[in-house]
Amino acid sequence: MRLFNVQNRSLQSKLRFSPAFRVLSSLFFIFAAATDTFCIMAYAGQAGPAAREHQSEVAPVVVQPGAPGEPTRRLPSSTTAKLPPASPADAEFMRGMIMHHAQAVEMTALITSHTENRDLRLLGARISNSQTDEIKFMKRWLTARGEPISMAMPGMPDMDRSGRPIALMPGMLTPEQMEALRKAKGAEFDHLFLTGMIQHHNGALIMVKDLFDTAGTGQDAEVFDFANDADNTQRAEIRIMQTMLEKEAPEERR
């Protein structure tokens, strides 16, 4: 019996240090771990509706960052983000720019039936697309803050909300200028469109400047970004139209 125990310990020692034994042992433990993981996953998948419902009902954590040097605060899970209050001047700027953009889109709509100038057609499409998209943005911005979209008093399209006649925004064409544009064709239309749109764009630059010159306005991130983008875009388009006008002069002298 003692001999057997000695032999047995000798065999165990050989097996303990045998490379083949260590490989087999490793494979066994990997298989066992994988089996346990599968069983846990299977159990989780077979958990009852109550358990799954409990998992889905875990409330999100809402944290409000503190001021510099102050700790964060944990808020109720029902907390929702609130938009900052709109500055009255910001809202007026948006309403005025909607009216301003609408006339630019109206002007570009005349191009296809009034001129064959390819460069002017491309420019008109660019202005129409960008300003139509911006009108949609400004309407969404006003609606999200519970602000009226139109400058006009309800039921009185020619009167503003204070009861006064609606004035044209800076740079907008007068009714007489718009009528002359509608009647023009070809080269005459091209010239009236370019000079009129340069006037129109310069008016938009004045509106942006007035916005930022007013204390407490332009603090809303979306208003700030939109006004700066509009300023940059319209400055670039003014340069394009001035170049197109300069090309007109030599052709007229021929």
Image (cartoon, helix red, strand yellow):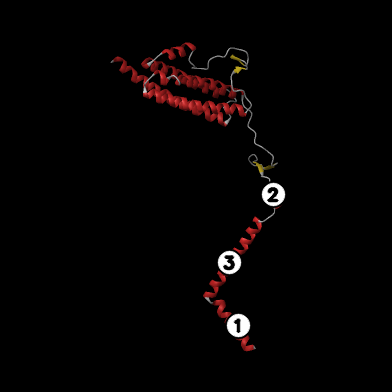
Toward the viewer: 42 or 140? 42
Looking at numbered disc 1 in the image, what kind of residue is underneath it? Answer: Arg
Residue type at mark 2: give it. Glu
- Closest to the camera, between mark 2 and mark 1, is 2
First in sequence: mark 2 vs mark 1: 1
Question: Residue under circle 2?
Answer: 53
Answer with mark 3 or mark 1, whichever residue precedes in sequence: 1
Write down the residue under mark 3: 31
**Residue sitting nearer the eye, 111 or 201:** 111
The reply, left or right, for residue 111 in relation to residue 6 is: left
SS label for mark 2: helix
Q: Residue at x 58, y 30 (%)?
A: 220
Which disc, if any, is residue 106?
none
Q: Are marks 3 and 2 in contact (CB under 8 Å)?
A: no
Q: Secondary structure at mark 1?
A: helix
Query: How far across and down, in percent of the image, does residue 29 sit?
Result: 59, 68
Circle 1 is placed at which residue position?
Answer: 9
Kindly report the distance in space between the C-alpha atoms of the residues bearing marks 3 and 2: 32 Å
Q: How many marks?
A: 3
Q: Is residue 41 above or below residue 87?
A: below
Q: Residues within 10 Å of mark 3 (few under 14, many from 20)?
A: few
* Mark positioned earlier in the residue sequence (3 or 2): 3
- On the rendered structure, is 160 left or right of 187? right
Q: CA distance from mark 2 to mark 1?
A: 55 Å
Quarter of the image with the C terminus is: top left
